[in-house]
Amino acid sequence: MDIALLLAFLGTAVLLTLSPGPDILFVTAQSIAQNAKAGVVTAFGLCTGLLVHMTAAAAGISAVIYQSAFAFSIVKYAGALYLFYLAWKAFRDREQPGLDMPEHSGASYLSLYRKGIIMNLLNPKVALFFLALLPQFIHTGSGPAALQVTVLGGIFIAQAFLVFGTVSLLAHQAGRLLANHPGAARKMNLVQALLFTIIGVQLVLGEK
């Protein structure tokens, strides 16, 4: 594949990953409320979901979902319900500080990993994003389109994990500052609840 085209794709991918959206906001919230490792584990889950979307785009499954208004709506509303469920859990735990807890069990991290996967898979806009972005960087004569989609998708996932990991480290530092202010720390679960609610509403109101 053309190097200039790959660099252009990489630049576009980084900018899109950094733009405010459900994934990066979710990573930020987990890193602030818990620690950097929690954010990285969440990012790993999100990127696993991206891997599924990439495979679906290469196989043409995403196009089928996009063309079916019913299938699109099912995925969209399921994603919104999951976000509202996370918002309710965060609101229910609003009295717990939730900050600066380095001693997580393996089960806790596994739960975060699963949340990342589910959240990403239940966002149909991610599938539409792959359908809209990747074809623009496919070069005729550079091999099968499905193979090019796979390569570009792999590049996107790799840079997304690096970006999310960096955001996790920075957000954790902000969380440590908040940990010195108990009043602010105890409001973090309320902030998460509000964040999940906003993302869920955006998902419900969003169109294809």
Image (spheres, rainbow, N blue to C red):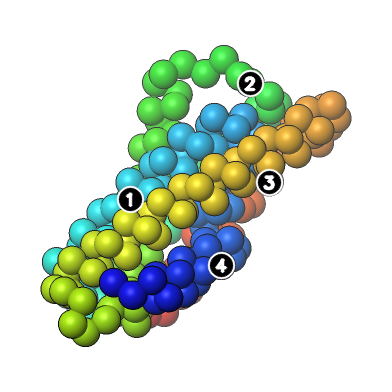
Secondary structure, mark 2, is loop
> Which is nearer the eye, 189 or 181?
181
Q: Secondary structure at mark 3?
A: helix
* Residue 27 image point, x, y percent: 55, 45
Up/down of 178 relative to 195, above or below: above
Cα–Cα span, label 4 and label 2: 31 Å
Please identify the quadrant where the C terminus is shown. Answer: bottom left
Q: Which residue is mark 3?
A: 191
Q: Residues within 10 Å of mark 2 (few under 14, many from 20)?
A: few
Tell me if label 1 and label 4 are in contact, CB under 8 Å.
Answer: no
* Dot 1 amino acid type: Gly
Mark-to-mark CA distance, 1 and 4: 19 Å
> Which residue is under mark 2?
101
Q: Is residue 90 left or right of residue 82?
A: right
Q: Position of residue 110 (x, y in %)?
A: 38, 28
Q: Nearer the viewer, mark 1 or mark 3?
A: 1
Tag shown at residue 49: 1
Circle 4 SS class: helix
Position of 161 compared to 31: left or right? left
